[in-house]
Each structure stands twice: as structure tokens, then as C-alpha cells.
Image: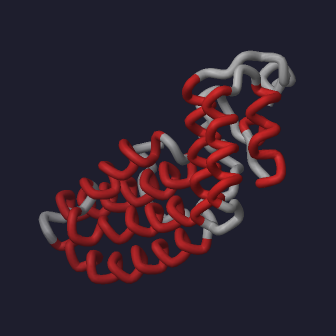
Amino acid sequence: MNSGYAAPELRVSDAEREAVVERLQEAYAEGRLEHSEFDVRMHLAMTSKTRGDLDAVTRDLGAGPAGRAGPAGLAGPDAPATGEDRVLAALAHGLGVPTLFLGPLVLMLTSGKRSAYVRRHAAEAVNFQLTLLLLTIVTFGLGSVVYAVAWGVAAVAAVVGLTGERFRYPWILRLVK
């Protein structure tokens, strides 16, 4: 991250305020903030003018705007995956079984916009399903036998997605990045 972005005197955007509001809501849901403290911090976040003001609101929670990549407050590619991100990543792999590549593609295009972790897993699931589909087409249906094995591999990928780790299917075409 460049030092210009983290400068505390720079004014904040609505997107940066929203990212802090989401972080405060997560902390409140986790029981890390009492209701009265949550109300005060929400007010401070919504009336903050500078990045320094926003950092002060979430500093003791472990992640503020300076800890996030980009001006929109999106989690960067190396940011730890949240519980929601891990579930969506597992869902992307699991949706490939009944919907082929369409389920993972929808997740990649929707939830992948806010989380690099979800996008990475969904893109991997899309590539896996497209590879299986192309194999089936090229072999005039004989490749469909591979789908039985594919369900097991997708289940393993879903479990890995839940753990917060990266997963790469072996021997697939990577058509979607």
C-alpha cells in the first residue's frame, strides 16, 4: 500500500465509511462491542471527515481503513478470509456439482467483487467445471464418467475453502482469472 493512501489527514469517501460501518457491525455481532459503544462508534464513523478519524473508530478492533486495500475498503488479496467469505468459497465449489459452471460464475460475479478470497475460489470452480464440460464435449460424452470423481474433488475443495486456505484443482484449463 502506498503511503499516500494511509495519510490520516486525507478526506474519506462514503465507500470508506461503509467499510468501517460493516466492520463495526461484525464486531457487534461477535460480541466485541456493547450496544452503547456500538452506537457511539457508528455515529463517529458516519460523521468522520478524515482517514485518521476512521482509523480511531476501529483501531482496537484490529482492522480499519488503513488495514484494507484500495479506496473502497475491500479486503485485499492477502487479507484473512472472514467466516462469510469461507462459506461462500465452499458454496462456489459445491454449486458446481448441480449447476456446472453457472453457480460458481454467479458467485464470482457477485460476491467476488467484494472479496478476493471468494473470487479466487469461485474462479477456480468455474475453470474446473468448464474443463469437465469441454472434456465431455470433446470425447462425445465419454468424459462424463469423470463427473463421478469430480464430485469428490469438489467436496474436498469446499472443505479447503471453509478452512480459509487456497485451493487449486490439478490438470484443469484456467480460462477465467
Residue 81 visible within the image: no
**Between residues 91 and 20, which one lies in front from this camera angle?**
20
The answer to whether 29 is drawn above or below residue 3 in the figure is: below
Q: How far across and how far down the image is residue 80, in percent? A: 68, 57
Q: Which corner quadrant of the image does residue 95 belong to?
A: bottom left
Quadrant (top left/top right/bottom left/bottom right) for the N terminus: top right
Does residue 72 appear to the left or right of 58 in the view shown?
left
Q: Nearest the camera: 39 or 29?
A: 39
Above-or-below relation of 121 to 30: above
**Residue in the foreground of this view, choosing between 30 and 105:** 30
Q: Residue at x 18, y 73 (%)?
A: 142
Report the residue at 48% width, 42% height from top.
177
Q: Is residue 15 left or right of residue 10?
A: left
| Displayed quadrant of residue 58 | top right
How far across and down, in percent of the image, does residue 77 sit? 65, 46
Q: Where does the image place residue 164, in percent across and percent down from the top left?
A: 62, 67
- Where residue 34 sits in the image (x, y, percent)? 68, 62
Left or right of 29 on screen, residue 59: right
User: Can residue 6 be seen here?
Assistant: yes
Which residue is more in the foreground, 114 or 152?
114
Residue at 40% in and 60% down? 125
